[in-house]
């Protein structure tokens, strides 16, 4: 099992930390000495996760905060509160997400749900937290993408899937957007001489409730082929599947704009992986960043 380097004295925010890779990342960061904020949509579930972490690590510093990435108002409330309490933030782990929602849903702000929750929300959160991150000695933003980004593209003509909605295509687009954000933030940090490290990861095929919660939204059930695939495609447990994210978030060998995943694509120990071709398009990354600023009303110019 990957051993997280000492995180003593660091403050970390982990989104979607009540289950799956988020909970595992929070648990292991806390065990390594970080003070960890579980940023979750449902505080009761966050408290349950906190209790589980404390049962395993009684001296861990873990607290629960409400954050709904499908609401720009919730993001602003979370970041304003954190800024009033702490002058710095060492680590932001953009982990929360929703996957393969069967029919088109919208966030509180009218964004397609997967794009809004998986990309636009984390984008706004990251920019709003930049002042706190840049006040830290060696800040880092680690963002979870997905192997589905390999076959995705950003459809600027129908970014919100208004004309045509596909659960898998919308999810893949949102995870490609996460990777483009990661690499664009890395480039901006280098251009401006910031000490900030922006890294990305993907978990391969990791068994979490992400596989069922999205497809089950609105009372739907995963299709037969999906159910069979869950059972026969090579997969791994959450302990192994979280390690690329932990490496991106904490390892001294992680590099600016680095991308990490399982050695054999779906499963295996962590290694650096080459971002897919669509994620290496700097023009698309810059255009998407500008569009995300317009949609969210949160811009780099107003935050730093």
Image (cartoon, rainbow, N blue to C red):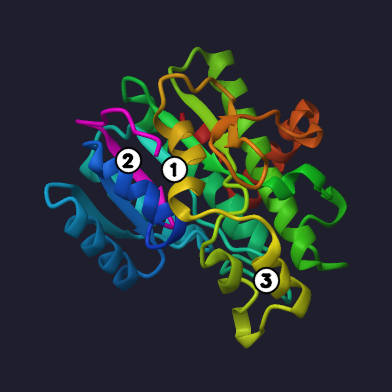
Disc 1 and disc 3: Cα gap in Å?
23 Å
Residue drawn at the location 62% of the way across and 58% of the way down: 116
Q: In which quarter of the image is residue 272?
A: top right
**Badge 1 vs badge 2, beta-carbon distance below 8 Å:** yes
Could you say which is closer to the camera, residue 3 or residue 302? 3
Name, please, the residue furthest toward the bottom: 219
**Label 2's element?**
strand
**Quadrant in which the N terminus appears:** top left
Could you say which is closer to the camera, residue 34 or residue 147? 147
Marked residue nearer the N-terminal end (1 or 3)? 1
Q: Is residue 12 magenta?
A: yes
- Taking the image as shown, residue 124 lies to the left or right of residue 284, namely left
- Taking the image as shown, residue 250 lies to the left or right of residue 227, namely left
- Taking the image as shown, residue 138 lies to the left or right of residue 55, namely right
Q: Is residue 210 magenta?
A: no
Residue drawn at the location 31% of the way across and 20% of the way down: 137
Q: Where is residue 26 in the image (x, y as percent from the top left)?
A: 34, 48
The reply to whether residue 232 is visible in this rendering is yes
Disc 1 and disc 2: Cα gap in Å?
7 Å
Check residue 12 in the rendering and tell me which mark sits there, or answer none. Answer: 2
User: Is the stretch drawn in magenta largely helix, strand or loop?
Assistant: loop
Name, please, the residue furthest toward the left: 59
**Badge 1 vs badge 3, beta-carbon distance below 8 Å:** no
Q: Which contiguous range is marked in magenta?
A: 1-16
Residue drawn at the location 35% of the way across and 45% of the way down: 13
Marked residue nearer the N-terminal end (2 or 3)? 2
Marked residue nearer the N-terminal end (1 or 2)? 2
Check residue 101 in the rendering and tell me which mark sits there, or answer none. Answer: 3
Q: Position of residue 229 (x, y in %)?
A: 72, 67
Check residue 93 in the rendering and tell me which mark sits there, or answer none. Answer: 1
Q: In this view, does 117 lie above or below 213?
A: above
* Crowd band around label 3 with a 10 angstrom C-alpha radius: few (<14), some (14–19), many (20+): many
């Amino acid at each position: 099992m990957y051993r997280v380097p000492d995180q003593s004295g660091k403050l970390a925010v982990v989104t979607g930390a009540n289950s799956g890779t988020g909970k595992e990342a929070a648990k292991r960061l806390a065990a390594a000495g970080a003070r960890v904020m579980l940023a979750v949509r449902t505080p009761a579930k966050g408290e349950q996760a906190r209790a589980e972490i404390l049962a395993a690590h009684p001296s861990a510093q873990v607290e629960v905060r409400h954050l709904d990435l499908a609401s720009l108002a919730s993001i602003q409330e979370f970041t304003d509160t954190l800024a009033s309490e702490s002058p710095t933030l060492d680590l932001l782990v953009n982990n929360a997400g929703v996957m393969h929602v069967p029919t088109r849903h919208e966030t509180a702000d009218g964004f397609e749900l997967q794009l809004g929750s998986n990309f636009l929300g984390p984008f706004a959160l990251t920019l709003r937290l930049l002042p706190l991150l840049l006040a830290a000695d060696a800040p880092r933003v680690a963002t979870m993408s997905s192997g589905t980004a390999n076959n995705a593209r950003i459809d600027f003509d129908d970014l919100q899937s208004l004309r045509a909605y596909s659960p898998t295509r919308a999810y893949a687009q949102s995870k490609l957007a996460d990777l483009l954000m990661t690499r664009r933030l890395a480039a901006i940090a280098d251009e401006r001489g910031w000490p900030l490290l922006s890294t990305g990861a993907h978990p391969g095929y990791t068994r979490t409730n992400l596989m069922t919660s999205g497809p089950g939204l609105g009372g739907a059930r995963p299709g037969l082929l999906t159910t069979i695939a869950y059972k026969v495609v090579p997969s791994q447990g959450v302990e192994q599947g979280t390690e690329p994210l932990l490496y991106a978030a904490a390892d001294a060998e992680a590099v600016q704009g680095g991308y990490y995943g399982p050695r054999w694509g779906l499963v295996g120990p962590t290694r650096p992986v080459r971002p897919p071709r669509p994620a290496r398009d700097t023009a698309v990354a810059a255009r998407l960043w500008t569009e995300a600023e317009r949609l969210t009303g949160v811009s780099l110019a107003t935050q730093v």
